[in-house]
Image (cartoon, rainbow, N blue to C red):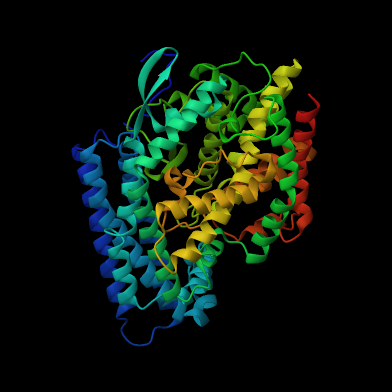
């Protein structure tokens, strides 16, 4: 691999190999810690001796939290290491077997958390005394208060244990199957005069190819490919959504959205306020789509043109060039951020190479044992991928701020809504830098296009995904859904969101097949927090533009504490009221200004 090639990540400072003695020792230590925690729980909580005084209760809670945090550091490190192989090589049978074995430990941890939540819920009246009499309990007061709140939505202990254990052969198995199918699917595709086998992430990246004939052929090839696997993927969807519906009903949740709202640490009214603002902004985005269609000599935009470049830009990036551009412009925002990014590049924390067996998209994962992060992306030299790397580095920086503040794993349990805060900020910094550097109108148009493609996906497409998932949950409660029905729901949701800005004869009815977010039993409505993150991040960036460097310490403190408060409480510290439509509209108006500039060029 040359110095110009996208890198593969390095986790050699974590463990030498999956087969290494060090890795095996870590797994054995984890099992011992888990057994010790289970014994502690059984002796002190499940079967307490007599009536406990407040100071005894405080001691038990504090010790339980300390043991859980140690366990989560080790478990998080092991899981990240295994996932580094599974996510980049779905043909690695050893890694998949080890992940399956590790999942059993994960279920045991989940059982302990469920049991503790049930127990602490019954001690709600003693919680103030517990927090006041133990330092560890006091430092985790938000966690304890949230546990009490959520304890009312639990089944009996035996039922919760059974549900957790059955997830191994149920929802988790369905999710693994979806990941395996989509990562191993490929298409023979002619490109630049040569026929080559393209993995689906590489084929999907052709959405942004400058040649319209390539984009259309890639779209058609993609549709055929997803059609060939639609039945097993429909089974995955039905299995997961059916299980989630059943558990939510048994746990007396209002609906599937109920747990998602609680996980996001927002109120239903905040979500509805944001969604209403998004819905009202749709005509603004349709204006953008029509303007883009007109550039191609069309009245409406075909799906394969949504991601197409416009303007004229000869700028492509080698990976080292992308690295230099990101670090240089991060430094203008914060030297601390630039230093973090440089460290991530220098120590090969990023896996950017496109290859067969590697999952599509991008993500950032914590490696708590070494207080680092690792980033996966599929780099193709485009500005969009530069934005993606900046976005994921934002997640890594978010983790770094918490690590530097010595936050525990429990304290770092961020909701999805706030997990996007730093990533959106970093992406915005790089987008503004790219725009300010471009003097030529066609170059500015090309950069604006890249930005608006991302913005419109997070607002318009994610709104369609919300509509899709809502209807799927509602209909799955009555019967299984065929692949054809899932396609119909997806097309209907896309028409509702994109409206007359998109050619309704050229939609993407198979979008549900490859988005992994739909296949997480633990995170229903996974997509909506991205819209929250974008609009919240834009709002924070506006504050930064007003306050300059003085904003950075406050910002770092915010990032370090996103796992220790509800979204509204954190936002109010910066003078933001998430219940008011005005905040969301102001953030959307920033995108509206970009659309106005786009249409004027």
Q: Give the vertical position of 120 relative to 15 (above or below).
A: below
Q: Residue at x 53, y 73 (%)?
A: 254
The location of residue 252, given as percent across then percent down, is 47, 76
Q: Is residue 175 left or right of 126 when viewed as pictured?
A: left
Q: Where 298 sits versus 133, above or below?
A: above
- Position in image of residue 461 (x %, y %): 59, 45
Please identify the quadrant where the C terminus is shown. top right
| Viewport quadrant of the N terminus | top left
Q: Nearer the viewer, residue 233 or 89?
A: 233
Q: Residue at left 74%, top 54%?
A: 576
Residue 281 lies, in percent from the top left, at 74, 48
Q: In front here: 363 or 169?
A: 169
Q: Is residue 555 visible?
A: yes
Which residue is pictured at 44% across the width and 29% down the height? 203
Does residue 22 appear anywhere in the picture?
no
The number of numbered discs placed on residues in the rendered structure image is 0
- Classify residue 479 as left or right of residue 124: left
Q: Nearer the viewer, residue 306 or 165?
A: 306
Where, by quadrant of the figure, is residue 297 drawn?
Answer: top right
């Amino acid at each position: 691999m040359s110095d110009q090639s996208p890198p593969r990540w390095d986790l050699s400072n974590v463990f030498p190999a999956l087969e290494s003695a060090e890795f095996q020792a870590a797994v054995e230590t984890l099992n011992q810690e888990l057994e010790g925690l289970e014994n502690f729980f059984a002796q002190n909580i499940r079967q307490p001796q007599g009536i406990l005084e407040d100071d005894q209760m405080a001691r038990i809670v504090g010790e339980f939290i300390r043991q859980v945090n140690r366990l989560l550091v080790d478990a998080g490190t092991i899981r990240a290491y295994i996932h580094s192989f599974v996510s980049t090589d779905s043909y690695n049978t050893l890694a998949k077997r080890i992940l399956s074995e590790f999942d059993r430990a994960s279920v045991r941890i989940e059982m302990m958390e469920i049991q503790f939540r049930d127990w602490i819920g019954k001690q709600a009246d003693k919680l103030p005394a517990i927090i006041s009499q133990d330092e560890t309990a006091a430092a985790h007061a938000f966690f304890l208060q949230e546990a009490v709140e959520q304890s009312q939505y639990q089944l009996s202990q035996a039922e919760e244990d059974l549900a957790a254990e059955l997830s191994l052969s149920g929802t988790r198995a369905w999710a693994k199957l979806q990941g395996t199918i989509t990562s191993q699917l490929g298409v023979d595709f002619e490109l630049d005069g040569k026929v080559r086998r393209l993995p689906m992430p590489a084929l999907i990246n052709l959405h942004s190819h400058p040649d319209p004939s390539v984009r259309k052929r890639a779209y058609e090839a993609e549709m055929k490919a997803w059609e060939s696997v639609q039945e097993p993927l429909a089974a995955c969807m039905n299995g997961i959504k059916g299980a989630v519906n059943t558990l939510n009903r048994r746990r007396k949740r209002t609906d599937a959205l109920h747990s998602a709202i609680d996980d996001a640490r927002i109120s239903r009214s905040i979500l509805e306020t944001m969604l209403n603002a998004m819905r009202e902004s749709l005509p603004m985005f349709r204006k953008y789509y029509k303007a883009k269609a007109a550039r191609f000599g069309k009245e409406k935009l075909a799906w394969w043109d949504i991601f197409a470049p416009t303007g004229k830009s000869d700028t492509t990036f080698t990976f080292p060039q992308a690295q230099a551009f990101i670090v240089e412009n991060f430094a203008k925002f914060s030297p601390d951020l630039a230093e973090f990014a440089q460290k991530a590049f220098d120590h090969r924390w990023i896996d950017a190479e496109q290859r067969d067996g590697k999952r599509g998209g991008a993500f950032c994962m914590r490696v708590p044992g070494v207080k680092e992060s690792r980033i996966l992306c599929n780099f193709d030299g485009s500005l969009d991928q530069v934005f993606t790397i900046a976005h994921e580095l934002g997640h890594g920086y978010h983790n770094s701020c918490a690590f530097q503040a010595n936050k525990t794993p429990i304290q770092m349990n961020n909701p999805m809504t706030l997990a996007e805060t730093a990533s959106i900020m970093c992406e915005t910094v790089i987008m503004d830098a790219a725009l300010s550097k471009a003097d030529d109108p066609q170059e500015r148009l090309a950069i604006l296009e890249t930005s608006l493609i991302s913005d419109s996906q997070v607002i318009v497409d994610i709104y369609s995904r919300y509509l899709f998932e809502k209807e799927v949950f509602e209909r799955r409660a009555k019967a299984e859904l065929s692949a054809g029905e899932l396609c119909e729901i997806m097309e209907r949701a896309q028409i509702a969101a994109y409206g007359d800005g998109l050619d309704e004869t050229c939609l993407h009815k198979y979008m549900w097949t490859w988005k992994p977010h739909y296949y997480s039993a633990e995170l229903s409505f996974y997509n909506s927090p991205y819209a929250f993150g974008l609009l919240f991040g834009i709002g924070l960036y506006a504050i930064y533009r007003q306050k300059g460097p003085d904003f950075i310490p406050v910002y770092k403190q915010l990032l370090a504490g996103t796992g220790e408060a509800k979204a509204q409480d954190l936002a109010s510290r910066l003078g933001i009221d998430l219940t008011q439509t005005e905040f969301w509209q102001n953030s959307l108006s920033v995108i509206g200004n970009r659309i106005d500039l786009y249409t004027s060029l």
